[in-house]
Amino acid sequence: MVENRRLTTKEAAAILDVCPGTLRSMDGSLRPSRTPRGHRRYSREMLENHLEKNGLSIAGRTQTGGNILFGAKEASEYLGVSHVTLGKIENLGLLQPYRTPGGHRRYSLQMLDEYLENSRRLSARR
């Protein structure tokens, strides 16, 4: 794989964890190059700079202020619940995830551990 290869909109959106439509709306801040046919192309460096500017990183899991952040799928696996149950836990106000610019939910490791600890305390009282 060539190091300087430009990424398609779909590839870049996956890296930023946003949908392609959201990525296209970010053209003003990202300024992608264009192919002769007008298709957008993004450099990995451009995406890394954007993430760094917003306190995030590409490496493995997203990070903010030193906290590891999980996506909804990872969070539900970590808690041992289904994706639907995770949503119900949020609706009850027991977890309040961060939101990415694209609207995706992010859960800090600390937040998930606190939820587990609190749910264990409630179970022990019964």
Image (tube, rainbow, N blue to C red):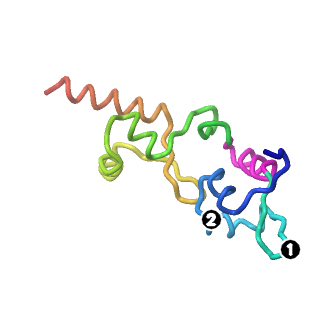
Residue drawn at (48%, 31%) of the image: 110
Magenta segment range?
44-57
Residue 97's spot in the image, x, y percent?
Answer: 46, 47
- Quadrant position of residue 61: top right
Q: Name which of mark 1 and mark 2 comes first in the sequence.
A: 2
Q: Work out which quarter of the rendered image holds the N terminus and state it.
A: top right
Which residue in the rendered view is the most extreme toward the front?
Answer: 1
User: Is residue 56 a member of the stretch shown in magenta?
Assistant: yes
Which residue in the rendered view is the most extreme toward the bottom?
Answer: 37
Residues tagged 1 and 2 counted as in contact (Cβ below 8 A): no
Residue 119's spot in the image, x, y percent?
Answer: 28, 31
**Label 2 amino acid?**
Pro
Check disc 2 and report the residue beneath it: 20
Residue drawn at (34%, 51%) of the image: 87
Q: How crowded is mark 1: few (under 14 residues within 10 Å), some or many (20 or more)?
A: few
Residue 23's spot in the image, x, y percent?
Answer: 67, 64
- Rendered image: mark on residue 123: none
- Quadrant position of residue 20: bottom right
- Quadrant position of residue 122: top left
Q: How far apart are the alpha carbons under marks 1 and 2? A: 20 Å
- Rendered image: mark on residue 36: 1
User: Is residue 41 a member of the stretch shown in magenta?
Assistant: no
Mostly what secondary structure, the magenta segment?
A: helix
Q: Is mark 1 on a helix, strand or loop?
A: loop
